[in-house]
Image (cartoon, helix red, strand yellow):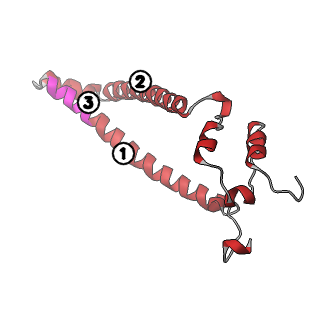
Amino acid sequence: MGDEPVTWRQIQQLNTEGVAVLSRAVLLNPPAPDERASQASYAGGLDPSSYYLFAALAGALALLEVGLLAGAAFAVGAKKQQRSLALLAASGAERGTIRLVVAAGGLWLGGAAGVLGGLLGIACATLTVESCGAGEASFFPESTSITGL
């Protein structure tokens, strides 16, 4: 490659081998949109809809796990409140009222955990962005005009 500019075909060939290439010649004179679309290859031969399907499946499995954990948390909470719930039942509370007490305890616990998790997530993300420099090493040198390149 040396003194000659890297062409679009060379970039595509290198990309299929897993090499990321940046060419000033291609940036200044990009290929036609139909050429880019016709020769685009996706990693592993998968099209973008496969990634959406994978994300939906992962989200469904995550929701299933959350549901199972919430059920276990409700059971543990009810076990710990067994005496209080027995006193409610003995004093004439209906089944709906007892269910409401258990659900309210779970909602309070879940709400507090959600807020705390959100705050911790934001704090961790902020620390990560600050420590990684937010990608400052990947920007192009400044130029006053394109003709000066």
Q: In this view, does 20 lie above or below 130?
A: above
> Which label's residue is closer to the chain start, 1 or 3?
3
- Crowdedness of circle 3 by 10 Å Cα count: few (<14), some, many (20+)? some
Label 1 or label 3, whichever lies nearer to me, is: 1
Magenta stretch, main secondary structure, is helix
Question: Of the residues under marks 1 and 2, which one precedes in the sequence?
Answer: 2
* Mark sitting on residue 70: none
For residue 68, the mark is: 2
Q: Is residue 44 visible in this depiction of the protein?
A: yes
Query: Camera-side residue: 9 or 112?
Result: 9
Tag 2: residue type? Leu
Nearer-the-camera pick, 71 or 84: 71
For label 3, the residue is 102
Q: How far apart are marks 3 and 2 (CA)?
A: 16 Å
In the depicted structure, whether residue 141 falls above or below residue 28: below
Query: Magenta span covers which residues?
Result: 96-104
Residue closest to the eye, 19 or 24: 24
Q: Disc 1, disc 3: CB below 8 Å? A: no
